[in-house]
Image (tube, rainbow, N blue to C red):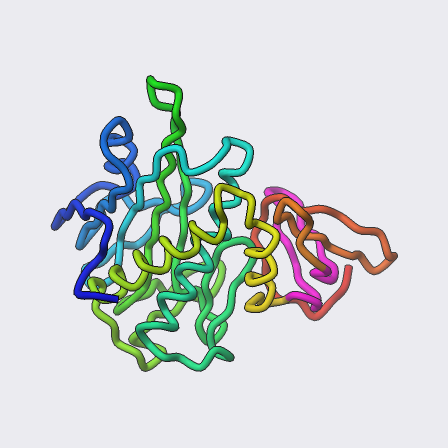
Amino acid sequence: MGRGPRTPVLRFPDIGSTNVEALSRASGTAPLWVVAERQTNGRGRRGRPWSSPVGNLYGSLLLVDAGPPARLPELCFVAALALYDAVRAVTFLDPLRVDLKWPNDVLVDGGKLAGILIEGTVRPDGLNATVIGFGVNCSHFPEDTPYRATSLAAAGCPTEPEALLASLDAAMLKRLEQWDRGAGFAVLCEDWCRHASGLGRPVTVRLGHRETGGIFEALDANGAMVLRHADGTRETINAGDVFPSVHVG
């Protein structure tokens, strides 16, 4: 793995948001990591605040022309698998303790370890710039969250953010190569499903103001969740918050 990331890293002690900073540099050279010891305005999906105390990893990877625009949403699976690989590599956690919650959450012992937020813009030269933001709970985790959170320290594997960053950089390079601008997405999805939490089991999905449930049957060709309801009908879910369920509804 080496002593540090192969990709250039821009470091800050404090910053509002590593994603915002990375996007502001979209016209420059990529790939590039923007990393901070602490964020004062960290964000999760749907604009939710992301707790960012010192001791965790906050890093955003800037990519330019990573793939065709229609394939860029697939990067959430690339990122999730890369983080899974990185966590396993630095902690040696039993694979039965680490899994993936659709679409891109990494779980340890059933608790959410990290948040991944992907944002993008189009540069003046017409190329797409994509930022993949990672917030990984190395030392600390929030207590009051919709889905129970955890940290590597709480799992008995205290890990320095810098060590995890080096492992994550190497894993991202490998998974991006596997994805191959979308050409390898089917194989990538097979890998994701091997580590999936809830696949083949009842789940509840919160969709804005609506909640639905059923068996998490599969991923479709685009990475959407295929949910089979109790009456046998199937629903394709493109975005939502997934929770374990004891019911099939």
Query: Does residue 38 appear to the left or right of 151 in the view shown?
Result: left
Which image quarter: residue 66? top left
Which of 43/8 is in front? Answer: 8
Q: Residue furthest left?
A: 13
| Quarter placement of the N terminus | bottom left
Rendered residue at 33%/17% (across/down): 124
| Quarter placement of the C terminus | bottom right
Q: Is residue 141 magenta?
A: no
- Residue 41 at x, y = what percent? 26, 43
- Residue 3 at x, y = what percent? 17, 65
Q: Is residue 157 positioned above or below 213 on the image?
A: below
Main SS of residues in magenta: strand
Rendered residue at 51%/69% (across/down): 99
Rendered residue at 35%/34% (across/down): 64
- Residue 158 at x, y = what percent? 26, 76
Q: Is residue 206 magenta?
A: yes
Which image quarter: residue 192? bottom right
Q: Residue furthest top?
A: 124
Q: Residue furthest right?
A: 231
Query: Does residue 233 appear to the left or right of 204 in the view shown?
Result: right
- Residue 143 at x, y = what percent? 37, 65
Rendered residue at 36%/53% (across/down): 173
Q: Is residue 198 positioned above or below 59 on the image?
A: below
Count of numbered circles on the image: 0
Which region of the structure is painted magenta?
Answer: 199-217
Which of 77/97 is in front? Answer: 77
